[in-house]
Amino acid sequence: MSIALLHSRTTLGIRAVPVRVEIHLGPGLPGFTVVGLADTAVRESKDRVRSALINGGFRIPQQRITVNLAPADLPKDGGRFDLPIAVGILLASGQLGRVDLKDMEWIGELALSGALSPVPAVLPGALAAARDGHTLVVPAANGDEAALAGADTLAVNSLTELCAHLKGDTRLPLHAPPASPGDDTGGAPCLSQIRGQPAAKRVLEIAAAGGHSLLMSGPPGAGKSMLASRLPGLLPPLDRERALEVAAIQLAASRAPRRRVPAAALPGAASHRLRCRAGGRRRPAAPRRDIPGP
């Protein structure tokens, strides 16, 4: 079989969007091409995969290797597609034999030695795999994060170890989920520690009881951060589903690039600029030049 299909996921905000990793070994001069709106880190996977296969004792097919990450209009980033690309090449070249990879998803970055390196934001993909009933293969360092979502997780250390499992030479057990940390709101600061500010404390209690949005404004040192740090102690503990959702949002926020917002894009910036110009000192008018008539 000269073509292989594996499934992976890429993160889009807090969602894990399915990605089909298609590998084709075709005639022509030996080469390695990755298509499908891949960024620089994904395109560089061909060098990582080639070195990992060689150092793992596998054969590089002397054919034209084409990797398609579908859908083609979805941006892909990071090194999470190294593992499905490498397994797909081995599968398409017949080095794994006939193995059943149905209902399996693959996420992992390869080191040049063939070891699996951890990747960020595995939790959204693990939650989606658990909902679909798929087994998720991840690096060993991401095993706890993936198993916490409830997905059947295979946490592997290297490409060689994974291939031995797929061929039936060894059997890797499913990664056990970590123990639940439980409710940690007991260590949160208590609202009773604040003296004064009865109106602000009353607003915190109403917002926590009714699930309302809360906006704090005031000069530095007014106590906004002190009051906000007491809010978790007023809220009830999250159930498992909501706790995982909050964790996925936190992971997405930590990966978001920090861009400086132009001043012109801020609300009211244009009108503020007009007011400043209107109220400031006027520039002297340019002298009028009369154009002589014919």
Image: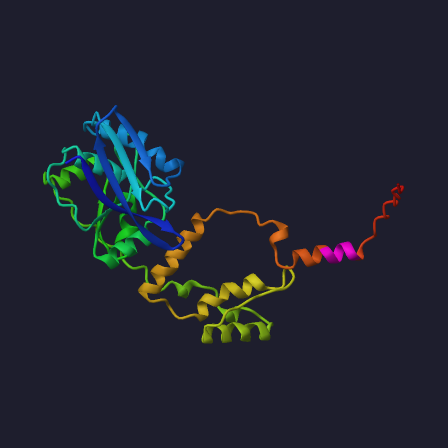
Quarter of the figure with the N terminus: top left
Report the number of numbered marks.
0
129 versus 48 height, above or below: below
Q: With 263 as the anchor, is 181 left or right in this view?
A: left
Q: With 32 as the anchor, is 246 left or right in this view?
A: right
Residue 176 in percent (x, y) is at 21, 53
Residue at coordinates 14% horizontally, 41% vertically from top-left? 166
Residue at coordinates 23% horizontally, 30% vertically from top-left? 53
Q: Which residues are magenta?
A: 274-278
247 versus 211 height, above or below: above
Q: Which of the pair 148/162 is nearer the observer?
A: 162
Q: Residue furthest top?
A: 29
Residue at coordinates 63% horizontally, 64% vertically from top-left? 218
Residue 33 in percent (x, y) is at 31, 32
Residue 78 in percent (x, y) is at 37, 41
**Is residue 158 in view from this perspective?**
no
Quarter of the figure with the C terminus: top right
The verdict on residue 144 being magenta is no
**Is residue 223 in view from this perspective?**
yes
Residue 175 in percent (x, y) is at 21, 50
Q: With 82 as the anchor, is 275 left or right in this view?
A: right
Q: Which of the pair 287/206 is nearer the observer?
A: 287
